[in-house]
Amino acid sequence: MRCKLTVFTLLACAVCAATGINHARAETYPNGVALEMEPADLWAIATIDGKFLPPIEFDHPTKMPVDITDVSEEGLRKICTGRSADIPMHGCAIIAPNYCDIFVRRPVLPPLTGNLVIRHERGHCNGWSGNHEGIR
């Protein structure tokens, strides 16, 4: 099956190419994305200082296609604008009516894991606002 790249993913790749930012991995999930938590993810959830997970109503597999792209922090800040430079940025989601693009900073900053960042951003794909109401 051929996967269709979204406009946002193509735009992000163009930004990366124009600025010399390399991304390590890009994957497309045409039927949505579900996650299986690994032991490192569960340990991070148990020991993290602060809240990071979306509310239960948004913390479920997506039903729309999702593209997940790994980028550097510099690339993440260029793709996902509007965040203060003094606050660490772990990922962002760009949502369209029929698909969602998730960008994950690599390397992930401990104590977070890649799965937890994707889980957080997947919550935004499922309708959770950027104001993070109900974060847990």
Image (tube, rainbow, N blue to C red):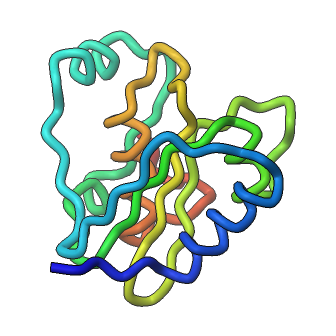
Look at the picture and state if 17 lies above or below 135.
below
Of all residues, the one furthest to the bottom in this rendering is 97
Look at the picture and state if 41 lies above or below 92.
above
Look at the picture and state if 30 lies above or below 121.
below
**Closest to the observer, 109 or 25:** 25
**Closest to the observer, 91 or 2:** 2
Q: Looking at the picture, how far across and down is residue 11, in whole percent?
A: 66, 73
Tell me if 35 is positioned left or right of 125 in this view.
left
Residue 98, quarter of the rendered image: bottom left
- Residue at 64%, 65% in the rendered image: 12
Count numbered badges in the picture: 0
Tell me if 87 is positioned left or right of 85 in this view.
left
The quarter of the picture where the C terminus appears is top left
Q: Looking at the picture, how far across and down is residue 100, in whole percent?
A: 43, 72
The quarter of the picture where the N terminus appears is bottom left
Look at the picture and state if 110 lies above or below 7.
above
- Residue at 20%, 61% in the rendered image: 61
- Residue at 13%, 39% in the rendered image: 36
Q: Looking at the picture, how far across and down is residue 16, in whole percent?
A: 71, 55
- Residue at 70%, 67% in the rendered image: 14
**Closest to the observer, 73 or 134:** 73
Q: Looking at the picture, how far across and down is residue 70, in whole percent?
A: 50, 44
